[in-house]
Image (cartoon, rainbow, N blue to C red):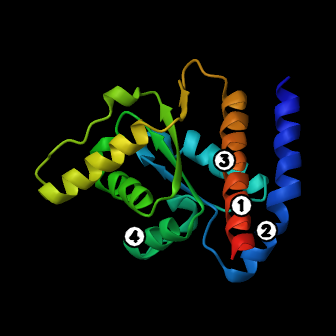
Amino acid sequence: MQLRGISSANNLYRKILQPQTRIHAATKTPCDIFINHRGIDTKKNIAGLLDDHFHRMGLRPFLDSRNMKPGDRLFEKINPAILNCKIGVAVFSPNYCDSYFCLHELALLMESKKRVIPIFCDVKPSQLRVMDYGTSSAKQLQRFSWALEEAKYTVGLTFDTLTGDWSHFLNTATDAVIKNLADLEAENSSKKSTL
C-alpha cells in the first residue's frame, strides 16, 4: 500500500515537476521549498531528513545550515529564499516560538501568501503561543501572532518523534509537498492560458 503512494508521487513528479525544475534552474530561483524550523529541535532529524529527501527527489529545498555558509548575513539569504520559494514547510516543535527567526520566517511566508504546509512535531497546535520576552516590539508580536494563527488553522501533518514511523512520515510529507507544487503549477498554467 505504501509503495503505491510512493510510486504515484514519483509519477506525478516526473510528469509535472521535473520539466519545470529544469526551466527554473536557468532562472536561478533559490529554492522550491523553504524549510522553516527550530534548529535545536529539528535540524538533525525532521528538517535535515526532509531536506535530504527533497534533494533526492530533484527538488531544491532551502535549509539554513545547508544553504548558508559562515559569513553570510541571515536576512540577506533567508528573506530572498522565502520570497522566491514556491512552498514553505513550517516544522513546529516545542521550542519553535522561542525563536525570533522562526517567527519572522513564518510571518514572511504568510505575508507573501506562500502556500505553507505545517508539520506539528512533538507539539500540538494549541500549545504554540507567541511569548513576549521584551525583545520584540508590539507590532512584531502582533505580526508573529497573526502568522502563527494562520498556520495553526491550516491543514498540516503531525509527528511524534518517539513513536512515529519515520519512513511513512517522510513519504507522506514529500507527497504533500509534491501535490502542492503540482497544484501551484496547474494554477500558474491556468493563469497563463487566460492571458
The image quarter in which residue 1 lies: top right
Which amino acid type is marked by label 1? Glu
Task: Give the label on residue 125, or none.
Answer: none
Task: Give the label on residue 185, or none.
Answer: 1
Which amino acid type is marked by label 4? Leu
Nearer the camera: disc 1 or disc 2: 1
Task: Give the label on residue 74, or none.
Answer: 4
Residue plotted at (72% across, 49% down):
178
Which amino acid type is marked by label 3? Val
Q: Determine whether the residue tagged by mark 4 lies in a helix, strand or loop.
A: helix
Residue plotted at (39% across, 70% down):
74
The residue tagged 2 is 20
The image quarter in which residue 195 lies: bottom right
Residue plotted at (39% across, 30% down):
125
The residue tagged 3 is 177
Residue plotted at (68% across, 36% down):
170
Please, is residue 103 above or below residue 157 in the view?
Answer: below
Q: Earlier in the sequence, mark 3 or mark 1?
A: 3
How many other residues sit within 10 Å of disc 1, few (<14), some (14-19) or many (≥20)? some
